[in-house]
Amino acid sequence: MKKINVWVIAAFFSAAFMQTVSAAEIKAIHNGSKIDVTIDNRFFTSYIFSIEEKYPFFFPVNGPVTDGSVTSMRNGEYPHHSSLFFGCDRVNGGNYWQEGLERGQIVSRGARIMEQGSRVVIIDECTWQRPGADMPVKDTRKITITAPSKDMRQIDFEVTVETLMDVVIQKTNHSLFSARTAVDISVKNGGVMVNAEGDQGEKATFGKPSAWIDFYGKRGNTIEGIAILQHPSNVEYPSPWFTRDYGFISPTPMYWPPNNAESIHLRKGEKITLRYRALIHAGDHKTADIAGQFAKYGKE
């Protein structure tokens, strides 16, 4: 009978213990018409799905070091930008992006917390509706929030859009998953916007297809930012980006339709699944290894 090496066993259980201890505890709680998420008892974000809002969105989206939001909302310049969100303008004559609920609204049927502990999983079903018109679209969202490290938070946003009738989306720069960054990290205030190819700023990134864009800036003695990654399985991947130095990024295929068309047509009953990952991180894009993070994401 072989002798059992007690030191090997002790090392194994010690490593397992350390892994358990170091894993972030991620919790979610319903708070009226929003779900609040904490990471190791530090408030991270709220998923807000109030019937009084244009669409569900995340706000704030707090950085891992400062606990200050890397996104902003309701800026006087563009009040229809609500932090981190998903929507689309010019859908069958409706507007599911800009202010005015009578023009169109993405309405949650009630977000549900499915899992919490090492991660938080939220499921939401939404209808796209406006007064006097049939609903063109409904969507189902799966939101997964994790903390890959002490310097990074991760929001995975997976949405399946189903057409309830024939749908025409006119060419628009207002579409799909988007982030309005905090003012202090905008390019106008000394921040950096960089894509996967290393292009920087609005002029170099606007309209260019790219797997990801990162937006970050100095905050006191640290750097924080937010990157959006497109999953390679998405239709029209990699989509061109609508970018603004004042602090806006969105992979927006609807502004550059195939074959220079003026609209995109979808038949009733079509289902399209889109996946995005938002990385909220400390450091610049190299320190946070956004390229490496994307390489892992592309294999998932």
Image (spheres, grey):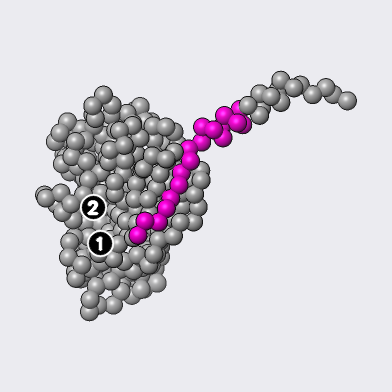
- Pick whichever, 287 or 169, lies toward us: 287
Question: Would you say 116 lies left or right of 186 here?
Answer: right
- Pick whichever, 28 or 76, lies toward us: 28
- Pick whichever, 145 or 200, lies toward us: 145
Q: Are marks 1 and 2 in contact (CB under 8 Å)?
A: yes
Q: Name the mark nearer the viewer: 1 or 2.
A: 1
Q: Position of residue 87 (x, y in %)?
A: 27, 59
* Residue 61, image quadrant: top left
Residue positioned 21% across, 56% down in the render: 174
Q: Identify the amino acid type marked 2.
A: Ser
Residue 158 seen anywhere in this rendered image of the structure: no
Q: Quadrant of the N terminus?
A: top right
Q: Residue furthest left?
A: 77
* Residue 122, image quadrant: bottom left
Instruction: Give the residues drawn in magenta, as a range.
Output: 15-32
Up-down relation of residue 290 to residue 258 (above or below): above
Q: Which mark is residue 82?
A: 2
Q: Position of residue 272 (x, y in %)?
A: 39, 61
Residue positioned 18% across, 52% down in the render: 74
Cα–Cα gap, marks 1 and 2: 10 Å
Residue positioned 57% across, 29% down in the render: 18
Q: Position of residue 282 (x, y in %)?
A: 33, 31
Residue 43 seen anywhere in this rendered image of the structure: yes
Ranked by sequence position, the earlier of labels 1 and 2 is: 1
Helix, strand, or loop for circle 1?
loop
Q: Identify the amino acid type marked 1.
A: Glu
Q: Residues within 10 Å of mark 1 (few under 14, many from 20)?
A: some
Q: Position of residue 208 (x, y in %)?
A: 24, 43
Residue assigned mark 1: 53
Helix, strand, or loop for circle 2?
loop
Question: In the rendered structure, does residue 176 fall within the stretch colored magenta?
Answer: no
